[in-house]
Amino acid sequence: MLKDTLKSIQRLSVIITGCALLAACGSDSADSTDVSTSKPLVLNPRIQLTQGLSTTKQYALNATQTLQIIQSGLYGHASVQGDTFTYQANADAQGTDQVKIAIVSSNKIETINWLVRINEPTPRFTTLALGDTSKNKTWQCVNDNSIHQGVVWASPLQPAMQTYAWGDWLPTLPAFQAQCQFTDSDGNSQACTTDRLVEYANQQNWCGRNDWRLPESYEVKGLVSEQDYALDNNQAAIDPYFFTATGFESYWLANDNNPSHADNIAPTLDFATGRHTAVMQNKRKPKSVMLVSGVKRDTTLPSEQEKPQVEKDSFIRLDNSGQPLPKALQDDDYATTPWRCLDDMRGLVRDNLYLRDKQFSYVYWLTPNPQDITNTGQQLAMQAGVPKAIDDVNQAQFCGRSDWRLPTADELAMLLYKGEQDSDYSLLYAASLNQPEHGDYWVKTASGYGLYSLPTTVSLQPKSATDADIGRILLIATEFENRATEDPRSVNNHGKPNFDSLRQAYANNRDYWPQPFVDDMLNYQELGTMPKPSFPNDNPYSKLKVTLGEKLFFDPFLSQAGDVACSSCHDPKLSWGDRREVSIGHDRQRGKRNAPTIVNSAFLPVLFWDSRAATLEQQALMPIQDPVEMAETLPRLLSRLNAHPQYPNLFKQAFPENTMNTDITEQQLGMALATFQRTIISNKSRFDTFVTQVESTRDTSALSDKELWGLDIFRRNGRCVNCHMGAEFTDHKMQNVGLTYYQGFYEDLGLYNVDGKSSSVGKFKTPSLRDVMNNHPWFHNGLLDTMVGIISMYSAGMADNAAFGWNKYDPTYPVLSKQIRPLNLTVAEAKALETFLSAITAPTRQTPATKFELGIN
């Protein structure tokens, strides 16, 4: 019983919600060694540590209690010795770590979630007293000591409970269903708008400040955490220690001053992974708010950077073929190891000028060479010399490119930096650019051409030029990679349908259903009812084999320690899965992947998430030998089975044809387990009833209006059938949906680990969606436990993973499947889609199917 309870704890995600005030969550001091039974146990302790330091906490345990680690951290070492918990931060770590421990007794388990913020010697954030004299104000102030130095944030501790219309929208509270704390002197609710909130914060002098405002987009993006919380633990990508309750809500930004937007829409931004771009929303629609106080400092602009990136982190030096010089030579001087071009990999470039809407962009600079036409010593007139010089450069195809051009004024300004206030702008990267000559340089402007003075200039505005002026050239090339966009067939087609018309459209044979939104109609298979499973000729069905396979499946005898059975990870009461993110195996080891259900495994052409087994007979033997799962060897297991008091006779009955060999064989073991698994098939779902009735009587009543709309979204606006097609709701192919964690802590290369092909990195098997609502958590790593989260991720187009910097030259860098593209589903569409997924989910079969159900005579 205790072991089962511990297992249930380990499958929980560690989602720290924080407390209303830091003081209520436990000490922020690193000295936590008090043992006190008079104080209640702090279940969510929070602490800050400097890199390399440790904290110790001693717990008051009685004779029946033990202290155990349930989940260790990522950025330090957690240990337990007796009644003492110790956490040692790594010397180079930075971020917020999560550790889960438990006080275990014979009849009770107390789970303790530690949240440890590891800081550099000077922490990026500190908290400030809010100073609000009114009651029930659930906000906190956070001071930024680093990226936006001097800026203070005010963030709500319950953002979902405090929502506002944007700025100048002034309806009453019931009109737009926002929620906030504003009341007039009579206690009546006042309009919940951002203007009213800003006014209130300044009146109350929050944190001693009266210059509160809505943040700019670049300011909010600067809060995105250095750790990818949204992928690791289903949390927002923002530091959970200082921004304790920030989630996937959308937050209002300051207006973009676009006159066409002034009356109806304003920008928002959320902290969901891969969605750190401003999205325009109707001002009337309530959203969450964070306020900011302090001087605006756009760190993507050279004039406002506190610390510009150093040269070695800014560029990759390329040879004349466009390939990088070896990393060991990147720091050499030009005379020793000459380079031809620079790949500009600065984050500030991507975030500001060169990440265009719907396109990723790459920026290259042509390094001046005194020995050829790129020599910046030559001065050229615009009409007479510049076009020919550029044409000559492109004819020469330096770095394998023929798209070199003059930079715009903004582009050239990205090479400049203004260090001290009131100083001139200086060329920051002269060494990487091979010391271009001093003088005026041509730039493209909105009205024609202008001249920039390098290496220093007083203004970022170029000087106007005439045909008689002369200047030097420093050339740029930009390359754009289109980002996936919404399927044009679904654009402007997200409204609620006419349900009478929708029923009429689906009250036909499936061949006449509305055309699905798929990319490859030739290989498309329409959704349908399940066929009967087939049994291979070399392992035909027999009742005795099913009975033997079932006994083996539930018997921990197959594992080395005798404590892990196949059913430990594939429990019929849990839909033949285990409801964990990843499974627990031999010696309490955590696996790397989520345990898929065995339901309908008879129909799978390949097995495991990475397709490393071609048959169920092969698959059945692999977990037994896996050192993390059952950790047994086949020779030792067969020896134990042959010495078992029951199994030899059961195998003889199941395999009567095996008259020449009386010993149990490896092949027989796999065949028995495979035969049993083939009998675990889906029960009939309401969708199956719908299809049957439609094709026999044109009756569509088996699905509700919402479920029928969900079916239409599944086939069309949601594009689900591009991968989840046919009777089994899968194409059985391998796809990369952007969850590779490439070169990260949770890296899993998927199919690449099996076939070694660079094109296979990050690819995993498309799972069947039959009975999908029974099989959470989902994805190969058990990432999400809510279907609304999955639909939201797919609707956003999953995480953008275009290769920048050195990744661009990595042949194994994972590439997102071309079937993945933004869907832009509405909330109503997402709910309808989830409802349909319930309609293709049937109650789980607990026992093997009968011969009749299997279609066996």
Image: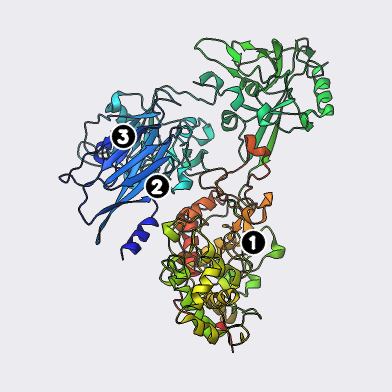
Considering the image in quadrants, where does the C terminus appear?
bottom right
Disc 3 crowd rating (10 Å Cα; few below 14, some 14-19, many 20+) is many
Q: Nearer the viewer, residue 720 or 400?
A: 400
**Location of residue 814 with respect to 603 vertically, above or below:** above
Tell which of 102 and 63 is nearer to you.
63
Number of other residues with Cα within 10 Å of mark 2, as a class: few under 14, some 14 to 19, many 20 or more: some
Badge 3 or badge 2: first in the primary sequence: 2
Question: Residue 801 in the image: x percent, y percent?
Answer: 59, 43
Q: Nearer the viewer, mark 1 or mark 2?
A: 2
- Give the SS element for disc 1: loop
Point 45% across, 71% down: residue: 557
Residue at the disc numbered 3: 140
Q: Which mark is residue 72?
A: 2
**Local SS, label 3:** strand
**Looking at the picture, which amino acid does disc 3 mark?**
Gln
Type of amino acid under label 1? Lys
- Residue 850 at x, y percent in the picture: 51, 84
Horizontal side, residue 202 vs residue 432: left or right: left
Q: Quadrant of residue 49?
A: top left
Vertical placement of residue 507 versus 808, above or below? below
